[in-house]
Image (cartoon, rainbow, N blue to C red):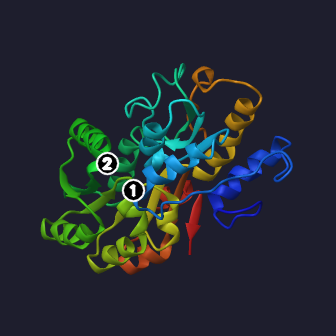
Amino acid sequence: MVGPQPRNTYTAAFLRGMREHGYVYGEHFVTEPRGGESRVERYPGLAAELVRLQVDVIVAVAPSLPAVKQATSTIPVVMAGSSDPVGEGFVQSLGHPGGNFTGLSFQGVELLGKRLELLKELVPGGAPVAVLWERGSLMAWQAVATAARERGWKLLSLEIRDGGEIEGAFKAATGARAGTLLVLTGVPFVSHAPQLAELAVKGRLPVMYPFRQFVEVGGLIAYSADLLDIWRRAAVFVDKILKGAKPADLPVEQPTKFELAINLKAAKALGLTIPPSLLLRADQVIE
């Protein structure tokens, strides 16, 4: 995340966006990167540290947003992706944010029905869909339950408190003869992405993930907004704020680019044939 050429792909996408708006790193701006290494308990301290530094703008993503909101009500905050900005209380409305937060939504809640449909297309039948979630994704779980109820599909709730309970949740899913598993957004899942992929193969369980990064480390399939595009577009908001605009007056932007990623190696390990209809729609196919 550090410097003008960071290895972190999302930070690099944001800096690319800044370059597109004419900003030269080190001449017009510098960054103060902070990462919690997927440990939620670190975010309040890191947010407070940035506030003490009196930075001009904070760019932050979903898991850290509550800590940033707690830390400041005056420094402009650009969301480089929030699942539900209004529902989670970061803005008053998408059109009129009203406070110090603005930025982009990745429509995490709205896309849940689509992910369920893709899973049913991948593995048709009446077997229940197991849903792996944690307390921070309660709203997402409620949205999934509503979407499944509307479609007449059975769900199996697998709530965990931390990453140490993931293996037990997979055993519960296979024990209940779930046909597929849907992983919701959550810090424990990001930090345990390789383990999720291994357990899926071990349990012969096709899994749908919330973001492409899970598929890149061995997961089967993911459907989401294009997060790299969201980080690049976060620079649009930073540019406007640095030129005097107030976050309260900058409407939150909805994603315009979505991506379906499929890992054929994972499919082979599961003994699963991906329907041609899905392969044709995939934006990224990992061989």
* Alpha carbon distance from label 2 to label 1: 10 Å
What residue would you read off at disc 2? 136
Going by the numbered disc 2, the residue's amino acid type is Gly
Q: Is residue 175 left or right of residue 132?
A: left
Q: Is residue 69 above or below residue 189?
A: above
Mark 1, residues whose alpha carbon is within 10 Å: few (<14), some, or many (≥20)? some
Instruction: Tell me the element at label 2.
Output: helix
Identify the residue at image location x=42%, y=29%.
86
Toward which corner of the image does residue 56 lie, by quadrant? Answer: top right
Mark 2, residues whose alpha carbon is within 10 Å: few (<14), some, or many (≥20)? some
Foreground residue, 137 or 123?
Answer: 137
Q: Is residue 253 above or below residue 176?
A: above
Q: Is residue 213 left or right of residue 156?
A: right
Going by the numbered disc 1, the residue's amino acid type is Val
Instruction: Tell me the element at label 1.
Output: helix
Q: Is residue 46 above or below residue 20?
A: below
- Which residue of the protein is positioned furthest toward the left in this rendering? 176
Nearer the camera: disc 2 or disc 1: 1
Mark 2 and mark 1 residues within 8 Å of each other at the beta carbon: yes
The tag earlier along the polypeptide, 2 or 1, is 1
What residue would you read off at disc 1? 40
Identify the residue at image location x=47%, y=40%.
71
Q: Tell me if I can see residue 30 in this picture.
A: yes
